Image (spheres, rainbow, N blue to C red):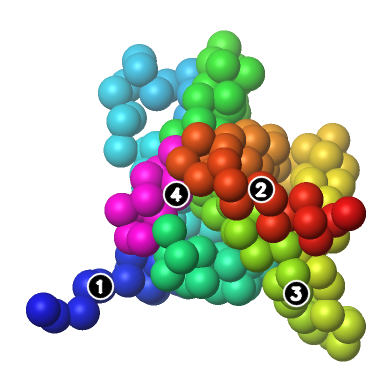
Amino acid sequence: MGSQVSAALVIFVATIVISLIGLFGSPKLIDRSLFRPYWFLRRQQYDTIVMSGLVHADLMHLIFNMMTFYFFAFPLERTIGTVQFVALYLAGLLISHAGTYYKQRNNPEYACLGASGAISAVLFAAIVYFPEQSLIILPIPIPIPAPLFGVLYLAYTYYASKHPHGRINHDAHLGGAITGLAFVAVTAPRAYGNLLQSIF
């Protein structure tokens, strides 16, 4: 049997390549990929559900999302398998978009991009499985425990959603987080035992 292709690696590379092309080569690609709730049904822009998750507002937006994805997605895929990982990623993307659609469906000026909902789902599912994991965000040389990173991630999201800029869909983080936690609760409820044990 040949080794199975890593879905996390495919998503990681595709997101970086397409985002960089949009940022530095073809701005029209980003504009075409924006998720616009008001126009989603009116202009049948169905592909923007996926395409908006492959482009980013700027280089820092891309780096932050891909750094989070890198630390958590690969070990999570190895643990739950490729099929479940892809299902989780798509669920995070679709459910966070559904929340955005409901909130902004009557606003013709609203448009957003980024893989934040999907990556948030991966992050919070990984926190349940690996509560002992930590990561280092340069230039801070101190390992940050995954649960604390998750809390800080949502705190930043809440602040950023109140001060929006750059068409980044900060509201998607919360929808993604709930999706990730619910996904694990449905597919592997026993995994919560490790998280509770780690906390208490």
- Per the image, the residue denoted by label 3 is 134
Three-letter amino acid code of the residue under disc 4? Tyr
Spatial distance from mark 1 to mark 2, Cα to Cα? 28 Å
Three-letter amino acid code of the residue under disc 1? Val
Q: Is residue 81 above or below residue 110?
A: below
Q: Residue at x 48, y 71 (%)?
A: 74
| Foreground tag (2 vs 3) | 2
Q: How many marks?
A: 4
Q: Which residues are magenta?
A: 81-91
Spatial distance from mark 1 to mark 4, Cα to Cα? 16 Å
Q: Residue at x 78, y 38 (%)?
A: 161
Which of the pair 104/28 is nearer the observer? Answer: 104
Spatial distance from mark 3 to mark 4, Cα to Cα? 21 Å
| Foreground tag (4 vs 2) | 2
Which of the pair 133/28 is nearer the observer? Answer: 133
Mark 1 / mark 4, whichever is N-terminal: 1
Mark 4 / mark 2, whichever is N-terminal: 4
Q: Is residue 89 magenta?
A: yes
Mark 3 / mark 1, whichever is N-terminal: 1
The spot of residue 151 in percent (x, y) is 83, 51
